[in-house]
């Protein structure tokens, strides 16, 4: 349930109303926008007398929310959330590109790619230190050493770093990671989501390869329920009967999510197609669909990459993609 307050309500009146709600065992979520203050109520709202509530002089309107996700719901928070990652803002009209290797392989590789993508307009550096691989014999990442190399690249380039966490026990190692990624395979790792909810660290939550939009939002709700509202959603393609591409990029998820939630939404065209030559067109399509950003895999030698070289673009290709995406976004302003 949400209660929209009239303009001019004093802080004391708002506090008294919230105390009344809390006395009924309800959790209160307050969202203050440019024109309205919305009080979201979570819990057994059957105890609330809607007619009594609507009759209060400070209440403009009352609505019941039927969706199971509350905190991520756009109805609870009319203004788009802007997530700040070390000064880099995502959402609310702020478009950013995250770029870097699928996996951190060496100091030279990581720093070289970081410098290249920054020069082409990327605002954050991605790099896998812990890699969830289908085969136990494939390269699993450099783990703590990989995170150290990312931190070195950040120190030299100034780019905030993004890396994927796979296990709760590794959370202390991510202290210097600016945006923690929850990968598709862990989207419904609820213990991990709860733990991330107890932190204030920004989280990039990827949609699972076989999960619905509703399930993605419910996973985000797990994080927000713990108090962490710094969440970016990522559409990275879903598994369908089509086998020509690695996954099927569901671009309709971008406008759909913008209708349902206040959280920013970015797109990962690299994992979606699994084919580097498709990344350019899918990046432009994602920008045109209204995405708040992109996550693109870049490698200086894709043919010899230790992980997902087939979907990685070269720095030169990334530079071309970034320029075309910028033109798409500029055209959308008209």
Image (cartoon, rainbow, N blue to C red):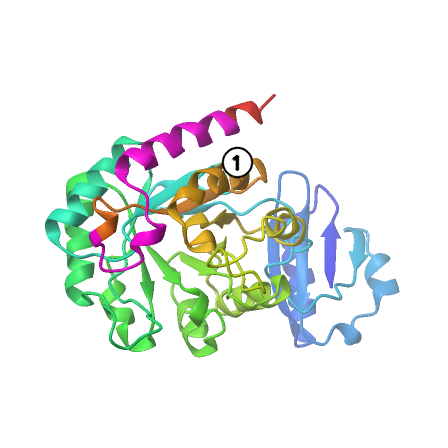
**Magenta stretch secondary structure, dominant:** helix
Q: In the image as oriented, which residue stretches furthest toward the top?
A: 334
Residue 282 seen in render: yes
Q: Does the magenta stretch include residue 240?
A: no
In the image, which residues are magenta?
Answer: 304-329
Residue for badge 1: 93
Q: Which of the 4 image quarters holds residue 288?
A: top right
Q: Where is residue 185 in the image (x, y as percent from the top left)?
A: 43, 70
Q: Residue furthest front?
A: 244
Location of residue 307 (image quadrant): bottom left
Front residue (pair 323, 305): 305
Q: Where is residue 193 in the image (x, y as percent from the top left)?
A: 45, 71
User: What crowding class fits label 1: few (fewer than 14 Cα within 10 Å), some (14-19), or many (20 or more)?
Assistant: some
Residue 231 visible, this orientation: no
Q: In which quarter of the image is the N terminus?
A: bottom right
Residue depicted at 40% across the width and 42% down the height: 277
Between 153 and 247, the residue placed more toward the observer is: 247
Q: Answer with left or right where residue 252 lies relative to residue 144.
A: right
């Amino acid at each position: 349930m949400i209660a929209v307050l009239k303009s001019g309500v004093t802080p004391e009146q708002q506090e008294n109303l919230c105390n009344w709600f809390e006395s009924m065992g309800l959790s209160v979520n307050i969202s203050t926008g440019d024109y309205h203050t919305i009080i979201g109520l979570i819990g057994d709202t059957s105890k609330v007398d809607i007619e009594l509530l609507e009759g209060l002089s400070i209440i403009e309107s009352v609505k019941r929310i039927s969706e199971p996700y509350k905190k991520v719901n756009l109805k609870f928070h009319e203004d788009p959330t802007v997530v700040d990652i070390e000064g880099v803002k995502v959402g609310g009209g702020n478009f950013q590109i995250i770029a870097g290797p699928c996996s951190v392989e060496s100091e030279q590789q990581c720093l070289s790619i970081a410098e290249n993508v920054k020069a082409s307009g990327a605002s954050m550096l991605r790099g896998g230190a812990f890699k969830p691989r289908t085969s136990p014999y494939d390269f699993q990442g450099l783990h703590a050493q990989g995170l150290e190399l990312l931190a070195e690249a950040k120190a030299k380039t100034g780019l905030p770093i993004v890396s994927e966490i796979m296990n709760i026990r590794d959370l202390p190692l991510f202290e210097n990671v600016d945006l923690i990624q929850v990968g598709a395979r862990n989207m419904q790792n609820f213990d991990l989501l709860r733990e991330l909810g107890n932190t204030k660290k920004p989280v990039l939550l990827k949609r699972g390869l076989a999960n619905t939009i509703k399930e993605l939002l419910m996973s985000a709700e797990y994080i927000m329920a713990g108090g962490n509202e710094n969440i970016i959603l990522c559409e990275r393609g879903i598994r369908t009967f089509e086998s020509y591409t690695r996954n099927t990029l569901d671009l309709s998820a971008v406008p759909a999510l913008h209708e349902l939630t206040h959280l920013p939404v970015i797109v990962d065209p690299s994992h979606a197609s699994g084919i580097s030559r498709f990344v350019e067109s899918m990046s432009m399509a994602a920008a045109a669909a209204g995405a708040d950003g992109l996550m693109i895999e870049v490698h200086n030698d894709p043919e010899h990459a230790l992980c997902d070289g087939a979907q990685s673009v070269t720095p030169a290709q990334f530079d071309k993609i970034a320029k075309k995406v910028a033109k798409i976004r500029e055209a959308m302003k008209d």
